[in-house]
Amino acid sequence: MVKPVVAIVGRPNVGKSTIFNRIVGERISIVEDVSGVTRDRIYSSAEWLTHEFNIIDTGGIDIGDEPFLDQIRQQAEIAIDEADVIILLTSGREGVTSADEEVAKILYRSKKPVVLAVNKVDNPEMRDQIYDFYALGFGEPFPVSGAHGIGLGDLLDEVAKHFPETEEEEYDDQVIKFCLIGRPNVGKSSLVNAILGEERVIVSDIAGTTRDAVDSLYTYDGQEYVIIDTAGMRKKGKVYESTEKYSVLRALRAMERSDVVLVVLNADEGIREQDKKIAGYAHEAGRAIVIVVNKWDTIEKDERTMRDFEQKIRNNFLFLDYAPIVFLSAKTKKRLHTLLPVINMVSENHAQRIQSSVLNEVIMDAVAMNPTPTDKGKRLKIFYATQVAVKPPTFILFVNEPELLHFSYERFLQNRIRETFGFEGTPIRIIARARK
Ligand code: GDP
Ligand code: GDP
């Protein structure tokens, strides 16, 4: 299902990131722990009652050295481009400012629904101050307090009223959807062209429904594929398009619609900090992953070159140890033929289902080989395991006390599952639940 997108816009300091974090809630990032990548979040999935949606904090997208008003104007444009519903956030402490009016003016021009929220209404006495905000022309203002978590329910109820009717699944389940992510200039567009050109395929550009993405649908060897648009392929000439945060946002959105993510590196330039960050996002998205080393033609090679490069990748992307690596050249098309079989393989693993009986045998064997950990005299007991989801494969372990499943033991079980069932290319998730 395609989730609706909500964007928060407003001048600096009204509390956009505070509200964003409140709505998103505590989501512990695995990658932040594992890879030492720290970052400020601007995009996340969120839930309200039965609704699932994605939310963007446009305030986190800084647009170079532009003057302050231009920055917020562009953030408003991003919201209009990317979102189904926009929250215009203001502050009850300062009242309506001219910068609020500027943002409002831009939002008028779009047809997107706008819900007006007045933040920093920390106590009921302050509610009288929201009436001035009717002047912004977006109807009833919703008083909220990001600091105290007040009013968010009513705000989100209103936001959810404007969600589009649930969109149909865009493609048949058999179709493999993939996207390419990576720094600028690693060769993403060249690689797309090489894939589409080389394979003598039927190409059709489908203009995306509400999100003006361009997908390329093609068939090769009886298998249908869709390449999902990413930032590099979208040239609308808007100022914000070249900013790093915006390209991250585009990449996150493309990954969300994909089964498989190709993390593209440039052999010529080696591995950079930004590559690690991008790979971290891919890991967190829970998609199948292939690491593609492009521009392999630019490297002087001997029999050890590939192995050395692979080792470098493994050392730098510890959390992607499950991802296969493909070396190729989009330019000369050398080794290009090795890519699709790997995409097929990881996509299959990503959707693999394991029978409970077989799974439990493997878990019991693992426990016999390496006894469960103890903590303060208490031993972890695993009663039963079952797979509850695919894409990515997700397993629930029913145990006596979930806290006893330490990271290292979870890792051990993961590895046993991987070795037995061959989950190459896909992350797998293990969740411990207390058995009642
Ligand atoms: P942004 O620039 O719009 O993302 O604003 P921030 O989320 O960074 O918040 C700006 C400042 O307002 C910070 O000092 C917050 O602690 C404060 N703030 C945010 N929400 C509230 C609120 O509901 N009440 C009060 N009193 N302060 C708030
Ligand atoms: P993107 O920004 O990631 O989409 O990168 P592009 O596809 O625009 O490629 C950036 C530059 O790298 C262009 O000048 C390409 O011609 C060049 N390039 C792309 N792939 C290869 C390759 O495999 N080998 C070499 N030598 N150059 C390449």
Image (cartoon, grey):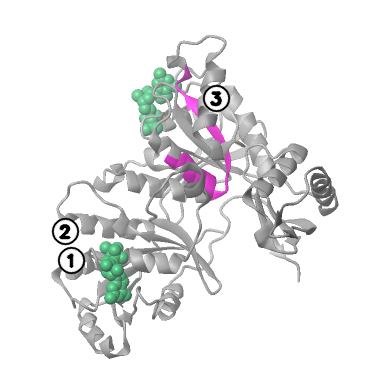
Reply yes or no: does residue 70 show up in magenta: no
According to the picture, the residue beneath numbered tag 2 turns out to be 69
Q: Which residue is drawn at 52% across and 58% down?
A: 2
Between 337 and 290, the one nearer to me in the picture: 290
| Whether residue 244 can be seen here | yes
Between 318 and 300, the one nearer to me in the picture: 318
Q: Which of marks 3 and 2 is in front?
A: 3
Using the image, determine if residue 306 lies above or below residue 22: above
Where's the C terminus, which quadrant?
A: bottom right
Q: Residue furthest front?
A: 377
Q: Nearer the viewer, mark 1 or mark 3?
A: 3
Tell me if 95 is positioned left or right of 277 in this view. Answer: left
Q: Residue at x 39, y 80 (%)?
A: 150
Q: Nearer the viewer, mark 1 or mark 2?
A: 2
Q: Which residue is drawn at 23% across and 85% down?
A: 129
Numbered label attached to residue 88:
none
Q: Which residue is drawn at 51% across and 29% down?
A: 313
